[in-house]
Image (cartoon, grey):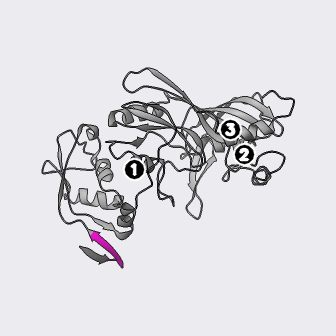
Amino acid sequence: MNHIIGGQTVATAPAVKWLLVDEESAGQRLDNFLMRHLKGVPKTHVYRIIRSGEVRINKGRASAETRVETGDEVRLPPVRISDKVAEKAAHPAPGREFPTLFEDDSLMAIDKPAGVAVHGGSGVSFGVIEQLRQARPQAKLLELVHRLDRETSGILLVAKKRSALKHLQDQFRERETGKTYLALVKGDWPAKLKVIDQPLHKFLLPDGERRVKVTTPEDPDGMRSITLVKVAERLPGATLLEVTIKTGRTHQIRVHLASQGHPIAGDDKYGDFEWNRQIQKQGSRPALKRMFLHAWRLQFNHPVSAERVALQADLPPDLKDYISHARPTSSPV
């Protein structure tokens, strides 16, 4: 059945549904559980039906913070889904597998290519996780453990069990993981500059786009951010760095390196735009068409065995080729 609400045609679900909570969903907050099952329904509407008592757990009222348990029966009232969402459901993301660095029953680690968002949103209709889910319809659960910027390539973890997701996210939050990136920056990086310990402040531009800046320790909205830097190779006019982050703030590496006067090559938000234009041109060496930031190495404790897992994703061919041609001819390859 269709109705017109606010000038927009919406479709109404025909009846109440009952969902049985399985082991994978046990321990999840009710609001997060509902959002997984009500794809495309605005968050505000999800919270509204919880507050109104239309959502029930075992026939009783519950709050957004209530944790669902295995065997619980969750009542879902009829919900409205816009034509736009219905159209999206009818034309899902194209299924796609990505190069796999590690996989078992609990998790998988892929080598994400540059230019692919990790998830849909902000003008992107789909990302890695939607494509993976479409390629693996039999998978009970596929959830991002962490995120990478769209233009950043490299190691991305995806959980295949709820318990693994929580365990790995706890490790990221408690800084028990080791995350090292390769970044090419403008200029000659100072050998003595090995630690950047500067708080970062998130803000929005007038058009609503998110940005980050270095701030002072006195800033109440500043988040302490620590980046370790090691010179991997010096090149004419640039330096290849191994960058290890101790905190996982939004755009941390990009902002920290740029704040020292050494922006990342190809960074369209915090970079040197004139330099970017120069390196994007095809000349005696290949053009650099993307930001030179690559999630190179990742270490974490396996959520089941507790063994330390060490992964490495080599530089993709375009970045490797750019470095190779940037070296002086006398430099060893």
Q: Amino acid at mark 1?
A: Gln
Spatial CA distance of label 3 from label 2 is 8 Å
Percent across and percent down for residue 174 are 46, 30
Name the foreground residue: 73 vs 257.
73
| Residue under the image location 47 percent in, 50 percent down | 119
Disc assigned to residue 265: 2
Note whether 71 is above or below 207 in the view shown: above
| Residue under the image location 36 percent in, 63 percent down | 90
Which callout, 1 or 2, points to the residue nearer the camera?
1
Q: Pointer 3: what residue?
A: 183
Name which quarter of the figure residue 8 lies in.
bottom left
Position of 289 with respect to 330 (left or right) is left
Note whether 227 is above or below 135 in the view shown: above
Name the foreground residue: 128 vs 65.
128
Percent across and percent down for residue 293 are 64, 41
Q: Amino acid at mark 3?
A: Ala
Q: Amino acid at mark 2?
A: Ala
